[in-house]
Amino acid sequence: MPHEDTEVLIAGGAVVGLTAALFLARAGVRVTLVERKPSTLRHPRARVINPRTVEIYRSVGLEETIIAAQSLTSDLSTKTVIRARTLNDAELFSMPMRNEAPGLSAATPCDWCSIDQNRLEEIVADHAVKLGADVRYSTELTSFDDDGDGVTATLRDADTGRERRIRARYLIAADGSRSSVRQRLGIGVTGPGVLQNIVSLVFKADLSGPLRGRDLGLGYFDQPEPGTRMMPMDGSRWVFVTPYDPVAGNAEGFDDDRCVAVIRAAVGVPDLRVDNIEVQIERTGAKVLGYEVAAQLAERYRQGRVFLAGDAAHAMPPTGALGAATGVQDAHNLAWKLAAVLAGDAGPGLLDTYEQERRAVAGHTIDYAMKTMRDRTSTADGDGKSVSYAAIILGYRYDSAAVLPEETGGPPALEPGLLGAPGTRAPHCPIVRDGVPASTLDLFGEGTVLLTGPEGGGWHGAAARAGLDARMIGGAELADPEGRWPRAYGVSPSGAVLVRPDGFVAWRAPVLPAALPRGPEAVLRSVAGRILDRG
């Protein structure tokens, strides 16, 4: 059997696996991704990415490309979210869609972006390949063995049936909520589990009559089944989702006639003309895709040299558009840690912090999505949420050995204006870099960075001697025109903040003490050593 080697093998080629491949390749890691489907799916699935997700892709130079590819229905500010018996009936619930996408311009340089997931995946895959990732479609991981020193996997070509072995230092399972890798490892899940089974399709029809002039962004309908949803793709194409009973038949049982019937039921027009139901998988001709809506959390995110990411680690209802975003965060968090360990810049203990950080975040995000789903689909009054949507998006906190906290405990997420402490995302501050407007967030991504103020020259010089990249905010190179940096980061002009490659604050010193027993260089070496498990 042919044999090959790589450093990281990724199973699953949707947005999470592709994002992991992108960030690993950018860090110079040899990465191979396998996906059993012949290409990215044509179905849009997730339709909107939040500002934090855009920030993550901005760090690899993809923000402008993604915005240029946004859908024709991208202006969320004019759209409406409704709930009704059918689209043609009176509304039971209505709100502006802008309430779903709160303005966060004070906290981030990035905005919401309405982009279909299939288009996003194409962009991320293309960039990952350009950076050196080996992305293989029509290739299935059929078995693997972790011997403690690495993972040996068997790959099968879906077209020819030929098999080959590949040896990797680590394996990332991004193979969905029914992850075969997770099941082979015997890792269980907690939570309610499968909430419903749904089918999804894309159809073309003129809905101008039942829309009655409304600019619909998202509709929840009780026909043909409660939980039915419709979202626009462009002027005449629509994404349609409805629950079904798997006991009575599977998704393949939805032929064209049945699809037209359920669409007409949801729209409330018995003789609606449906012009087209689009093919989603060209190789098979499938027009209808079946999914499970679930709420579950893997009992652990790591076993030996195998890591779970995305839906393989956590699944949540689509309300709030948090599932894909949480998975992208997983990939972003794990990639820099694997790259640091593989390069010898960090000890293996750093990899333990992936589960410590990401599992807690997924847990409270699932809770938020569940509450939002109940609010949208139930007639009962909502039970309220302990944190805001903005806090869920930008304010999630990490508590692990890769952070030197100033205090223990605290809420799982903070409002965006309260960030800056160790364990939180580094705040956005407008700066001017070499005469060009930028954000402090643009300084992060390629390595651990020490930010110092204009009076922190002692830190700045010590960082260079300690092998750390240092940037002085408020100097000639990085101007702070609004003088926001010290206040936003909770330090004085002589303070310092150590920021990880994923843009999270790992440590900060409010001031440069007049005298340090071991000097600032020794302090920085000690801090970096603890965060990166350098022993």
Image (tube, rainbow, N blue to C red):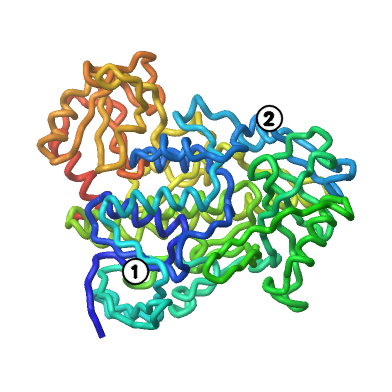
Please provide percent x and percent y for residue 376.
Answer: 75, 48
In-front residue for pair 260/242: 260
Q: Which residue is mark 2?
A: 78
**C-alpha distance separating marks 1 and 2:** 44 Å
In-front residue for pair 410/330: 330
Q: Quadrant of the C terminus?
A: bottom left
Along the horizontal axis of the image, is 378 left or right of 352? Answer: right
Residue depicted at 66% across the width and 32% down the height: 98
Along the horizontal axis of the image, is 414 left or right of 245? Answer: left
Residue 517 seen in the figure: no
Q: Which residue is mark 1?
A: 171
Please provide percent x and percent y for residue 65.
Answer: 41, 38
What's the amino acid at mark 2? Thr
Residue depicted at 52% across the width and 62% down the height: 311
Point out the residue furthest to the left here: 465
What's the amino acid at mark 1? Leu
Q: Which mark is residue 132?
A: none
In the structure shown, which secondary structural element does the residue marked by tag 2 occupy? helix
Q: Quadrant of the N terminus?
A: bottom left
Q: Is residue 318 above or below residue 214?
A: below
Task: Classify residue 140 by image quadrant.
Answer: bottom left
Residue depicted at 35% across the width and 79% down the height: 144
Crowding near the residue tagged with mark 1, few <14, some 14–19, many ≥20 C-alpha atoms within 10 Å: many
Crowding near the residue tagged with mark 2, few <14, some 14–19, many ≥20 C-alpha atoms within 10 Å: some
Please provide percent x and percent y for residue 271.
Answer: 88, 54
Please provide percent x and percent y for residue 494.
Answer: 25, 22
Going from the N terminus, do you reach mark 1 or mark 2 first? Answer: 2
